[in-house]
């Protein structure tokens, strides 16, 4: 998995996290760590570009779930073992993060998985880059 950050200027600055390769158990913690680092550096608006992710496993889904928790201001790590915590996304509590964390151009198989597990209903998903940058 390769993770590249870039910055886009819209109404607000938007960090773009472009993922390349399968998102699975071999690399899901990298996504979490990079998102935590970006949030710690002051990023509050982020687009996750999934256009080059052909496959996402349950661990990959968990990484997206954890990024939601990070951007809603919650701790992503448990105190006991340092692993990501598995609290549920709560639309009432975490729904505000939808304005600040969006997904771009998931491939059809990845989009289908997001739909099946219910994350498609939580994330705003865009297929037009200019439109998503303007949406922040």
Image (cartoon, rainbow, N blue to C red):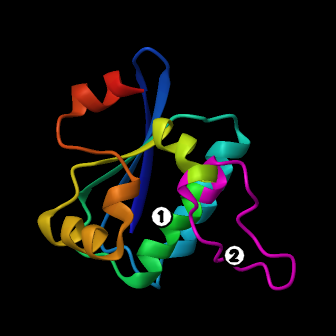
What residue occupies the far left of the structure in this picture? 108
Secondary structure under the numbered disc 2 in the rendered image: loop
Q: Residue at x 63, y 62 (%)?
A: 33
Magenta stretch contains residue 81? yes
Q: Can residue 34 be spotted in the picture? A: no
The x, y position of residue 25, in whole percent, is: 46, 85
- Which is more toward the observer, 51 or 115? 115
Over which residues does the magenta segment extend? Answer: 69-91
Quarter of the rendering containing residue 133: top left
In the rendered view, would you say 69 is above or below 40? below
Q: Residue at x 73, y 56 (%)?
A: 74
Secondary structure under the numbered disc 1 in the rendered image: helix
The disc at residue 89 is: none
- Which is more toward the observer, 62 or 17? 62
Q: CA distance from mark 1 to mark 2?
A: 12 Å
In the rendered view, would you say 49 is above or below 87? above
Q: Can residue 12 be spotted in the picture? A: yes
What residue occupies the far right of the structure in this picture? 79
Q: Quadrant of the C terminus?
A: top left
Instruction: Report which residue position mark 1 lands on.
Output: 64
Magenta stretch contains residue 133? no
Residue 87 is left or right of residue 26, and the answer is right
In the rendered view, would you say 130 is above or below 112? above
Instruction: Report which residue position mark 2 lands on.
Output: 85
Q: Residues within 10 Å of mark 2 (few under 14, many from 20)?
A: some
What residue occupies the far top of the structure in this picture? 11
- The answer to whether mark 1 and mark 2 are in CB contact below 8 A is no
Magenta stretch secondary structure, dominant = loop
The x, y position of residue 61, in whole percent, is: 42, 73
């Amino acid at each position: 998995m390769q993770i590249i950050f870039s910055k886009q200027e819209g109404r607000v600055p938007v960090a773009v996290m472009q993922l390349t390769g399968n998102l699975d158990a071999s690399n899901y913690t990298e996504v979490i760590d990079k998102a935590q680092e970006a949030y710690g550096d002051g990023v509050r608006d982020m687009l996750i570009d999934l256009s080059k992710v052909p496959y996402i496993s349950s661990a990959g889904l968990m990484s997206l779930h954890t990024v939601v928790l990070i951007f809603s201001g919650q701790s992503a790590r448990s105190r006991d073992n340092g692993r990501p915590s598995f609290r549920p996304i709560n639309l009432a509590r975490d729904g505000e993060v939808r304005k600040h964390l969006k997904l771009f151009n998931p491939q059809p198989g990845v989009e289908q998985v997001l739909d099946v597990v219910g994350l498609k209903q939580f994330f705003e998903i865009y297929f037009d880059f200019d439109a998503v940058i303007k949406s922040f």
